[in-house]
Image (cartoon, coloured by chain):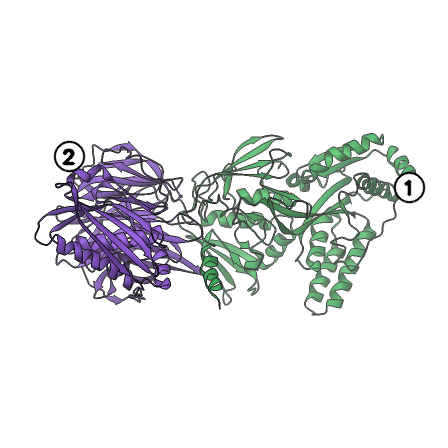
Chain colours: A green, B purple
Amino acid sequence: MNKSKLLLIPLALTLVFAIKPYYGGEICIRLNEPTSFNLNTANYSNLIFYSLIYENFFYLKKDGEISSNVFQDYRYDAGSRTLTLSVKDHLSFSNGKPLTARNIQVSLKIFMDLDLFAASKLSKIIKNVRVSNSQVLIELLNDNPDILSLLTAPELVVLAENEQSFSGLFYPQEWEKNNHLTLKANPFYAGGRAYLDTVKVTFGESPQPDLFLSSPKQFKENFREFDSGIYQNIYLCFLQSDIGQNTKIALFTLLKRFNEALGFKYRELRTLTADEESPVSIQIKTLSPQKTFSILKSSDIKLYILASLSDLEKDLDAYLKSNNLKIEMQFIDDSQFMGFLNSADIKYVLIDKIFQKKTPVEEKISRILKESSFNRFNARYLRMLGELDEVKFSNSQELVIEQIARISEAIVNDGFIFPLFQKNYSLYIRKAWPAMEIDFYGRPLLQKTGKNND
Amino acid sequence: MKKVICPLLLLFLYQAAAFGQQNAEALVAESAAFLSTFFKNRYDIRVAVVRFENDSELSDTAMQKIYQMLVSRLENEKNIHVSDLLLNFTAGQGEFNLSRVNDLQFLLNLKLIQNKSKTGLGLTVFSRLQDKIVAVKYFEKNLSPGEMEYLNTRDFAFSELGFSKLLEFESKKNLMDIRSIPEGDGQEQYFFYYPDEIVVYLASETRLEKFSQFKLEWTRPLYPVLHYEGRLLLFYLKQALVLTAGNNFSPSAQVLTWRDGQWQELPKIDFVPFQFLLLNQNPYLVGARYEEGKNYFKDKIYFLPFADLADRSGAYEKKAYPAMALDFSVQDGQLQAMHVIDRNYTYHLLTSEFEEKSPLPEKKGASLAASGGQWLAVSDYTRTSDQLFFYDIRDGGQKLVYTGKVSGEIQFLAAGVWQKTMGFWVGIRQRQDDQERFVVQFWGKHDE
């Protein structure tokens, strides 16, 4: 080995460290404006935002490693089918109020009541959740050593009784609507406070953010690009059974033409999950422009759109006006959406779902069926999900694919959900901010992000 | 106290003893021997090098080493009092503090010369009283390219004359501080401060043996941290051993005293005590407060009268800098100076009146510790490497005298004693292949 090689080794080792790291500074992140501080991780932007103010029970790294800042110890005992979580001593929420095992118990129960695939999966296997001093004991119905991985769901976070206290790395300090939101470092953060003092979440183009989401391969200079590992699907849903087929197709055609008019800003989606992984391609024949407009002009359509898709509003409104179409748009908060489901007023909804690319396709299909069939969910779907579970254990990929195709076909034939678009994201961060990682769910981990002290 | 002596698995790694500077040392030895002979029959000679020029191939770093070797040798002469006036070496020239020349009897002028393959050292002795040059001498040695390269390298520790690593062992993670205090029989007890406990060791020849340990209970509010930092202080008050332990995750420092064979809790203090010293003949605890959960101190220094364990009235504070690190030079219980590394990693020296001493050449650092009023150790602040700088702070200066490379990231520096040698404890975080370990080193100066 020559001399220059010998010198390189110690240098490479020491470069990893920041010597006496600098605390302070502000990072500017561009995200969609949230509707409230109530947890809602329906889209990628929200997934990031709420990860800043709410602490997850467990984190899942890209390499599969599971870690926790809240628990000093966690162990599963197969004999008693119990997972014991020991909460660290003297933890506090952002306002200094104690964070105890009781908060963990309540947070877990709230999560299990959510209408999410991961939540229902967990609630099916948990028998009870008890608290003993600083420990939370989760007793399972059957032995399941994989219980910990189910607790890494990004929606499973530590909630306080008081809405104004937060468990995350930061807490909200100031919110100027339609402009920005300021988050301050939580001095009581369970994992050790962040180097940064402030995160400024902006909702517009300026100032130039340090961290933002955008289409892949857009920014090369001054920014590092991270593959988020996720995609966001947008679907058109019909919540009432009395909607005519022509109206459905006309609305679908309108939205497809809207994307065309935008120069295909969104990637076309022809499957329920992703075109490259689905065994079934959905071809919905669109109507001519004349027929589309004719149908829609004679219909009284009120299109509900989840607030997480609010960035569509400006373009869609302009498009409708340019075509003299009177379709009323109503944005509703994701967290309030489930409460509206039984209302006869809601017929047409635009929803989105985010998926991790690595998640098996059968799990994504199950999620769509469970979370997006709304009040159409029935015994037939339940049976199909049961069959999917069974074939998963058959070790036959062919059988799994066949069952996925069967479910997709049933969903499409029932006509309550039409796939529209897919958005792919990269996460960009200015090169001046080193030491940032992203987790399995594509969320930036800002705890160790700080100014370079060189 | 029940003695529970458990062997501690320590890895002792003494520094390599052999350095390749024999000819340079010989050059210096001959020069020193000449001066020793020259001053042989005189007493209380006050002398200093006031000029040092370099016309050789050697670097400023090498000049500094040669200078230090010469000064160290002269310091060993009983009849010679050497004043170390060197401020810095730049561009082949030494910079000296000439404001104190009037106190001296003899001035030395040195010059390094390259003579073909040999390196020469020219030495001129000037008598201030006679106002003339009284001796001129020239020494020459063949310095090989290897030796030259060695002298020119910065990571040099003087094995015999300067600070060097005397001890190294691995510790449990998150060690925050090490302090020691002699027991009644004179044996030194070493207190290792971890976030949740203090472990006490006794020195046994070249090893540390675990003697006892006790848990530290911290109460809410607690500020979880990414980097644990803390400071221990040990002192005797009215024959009772008192221990204070402050840190960056609790706003209160614990105060314990050893009574009736056990540690007893005293009321907490709302700052981190650094020193127990005398101010106007009254004993005080002096310290600072961390920014909660962070790795730096707020901008105030706190003074708490501590003549009595119960009476704490009369506390006051003084404004200083927000500090990445700070320490106090104390001699004979009296405050001499305060050393600060500010939030921009810049070093400041404050007098005992808390006035900044200026102007000083800009100096950067991360951690620091002062050993009495004699030595100051500072760690580097850059990302690419870490190293120790030892400054001579006697005579109120801050002259860089020795440097030593350290593998890893220095977490803390603490003045201490090991086997009767004064020096500094260094806590280092090392990481390799995703494995992290915590290493403790002791750097000492053999002749002190």
Same-chain check, marks 1 and 2: no
Residue B134, how many percent across, how many down?
15, 47
Q: Which chain's residue wears label 2? A: B
Tell me if I can see residue B193 in this picture: no
Tell me if I can see residue A297 in this picture: yes
Disc 2 crowd rating (10 Å Cα; few below 14, some 14-19, many 20+) is: few
Q: Amino acid at mark 1?
A: Ser
Q: Nearer the viewer, residue B212 or A376?
A: B212
Question: Quarter-wise, where is residue A343 in the image?
Answer: top right
Q: Amino acid at mark 2?
A: Asn
Residue A132, how many percent across, how many down?
43, 54
Left or right: residue A30 versus residue A252 is left
Q: In the drawing, what numbered circle is on residue A242?
A: none
The residue where tag 2 is placed is B280
Q: Which chain's residue wears label 1? A: A
Q: Nearer the viewer, residue A395 or B433?
A: B433
Residue at the image position 91 percent from the left and 38 percent from the top: A291
Q: Count the labels in the image.
A: 2
Question: Quarter-wise, where is residue A346 in the image?
Answer: top right
Residue extending farthest to the bottom is: A395
Residue A200, how many percent across, how many down?
55, 36
The residue where tag 1 is placed is A288
Residue A168, how many percent across, how many down?
51, 44
Q: Are marks 1 and 2 in contact (CB under 8 Å)?
A: no
Q: Please say if B334 is above or below A75.
A: above
Q: Secondary structure at mark 1?
A: loop
Disc 1 crowd rating (10 Å Cα; few below 14, some 14-19, many 20+) is: few
* Label 1 – label 2 distance at C-alpha: 96 Å
Q: Nearer the viewer, mark 1 or mark 2?
A: 2
